[in-house]
Image: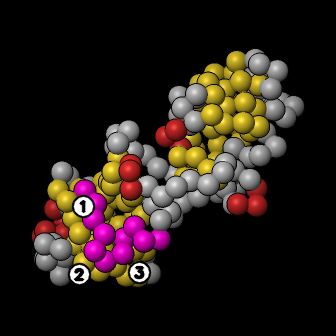
Amino acid sequence: MSWGQSPERGIQLIVNSPSSDDHLLVGVVGPAVGLKGEVEVDVVSDDPARFAPGSTMIAAGRELSVRSVRTNRRGTVVAFDGVTDRAAAEALRGAELIVPRSRARELGPREYWDHDLVGCEVLTAAGEAVGRVSEVLHAPANDVLVVGGHLIPLVEHIVLDVQPKKTITIDPIPGLLDG
């Protein structure tokens, strides 16, 4: 689960890098765990039911169904139907786990998928063009929009309005756009 901003600060960014506009990344397969086909998964979905037993996702062009899920000291461990030994589990290592975008949860007000912000034109409240968002960084305190040589914190008192896939209006604090 990755959230770019806590709800009390107003803007929440749902961390996600889609493989395409039609799919959402929900996790990345890590190393095998044990001998029975389990794998560590770096989960990037904020949907708590995403890895529930019986849920399905796609990895390397193959549909996988979750057989079981548990946590260990390093994170989330998932077993998929049909992946029954260590060799089969290791063969999945590094694979992106994706789901159709139609299966994404509904976003609340002031929540955005990060890929809907990349490419947005950033304007000041006065209408001055700043540039386009090239990347979203997920820092510990808050998410940050990379716009040209500027790093713009994705916080409510700076980001005034977001029109996903179009524009972002900001009220820059002194010095934010200098240099």
Front position among marks 2 and 3 = 3
Asked whether, in this view, residue 110 is left or right of residue 22, the answer is right
**Disc 1, SS:** loop
Q: Which amino acid does label 2 sit on?
A: Gly
Examine the image and state in which quarter residue 123 appears.
Answer: top right
Pick whichever, 101 or 77, lies toward us.
101
**Disc 3, SS:** strand
Counting other residues with Cα less than 10 Å from the Cα at mark 1, is it few (<14), some (14-19), or many (20 or more)?
Answer: some
Residue 117's tag is none
Examine the image and state in which quarter residue 99 appears.
Answer: bottom left
**Disc 2, SS:** loop
Kindly identify the residue that appears in the image at 67 percent across and 31 percent down.
168
Q: Which one is earlier in the sequence, the residue at label 2 or at label 3?
A: 2
Residue highlighted by disc 1: 93
Kindly identify the residue that appears in the image at 13 percent across and 77 percent down.
84
- What colouring style does the render use? secondary structure
Pick whichever, 88 or 7, lies toward us.
7
Residue highlighted by disc 2: 34
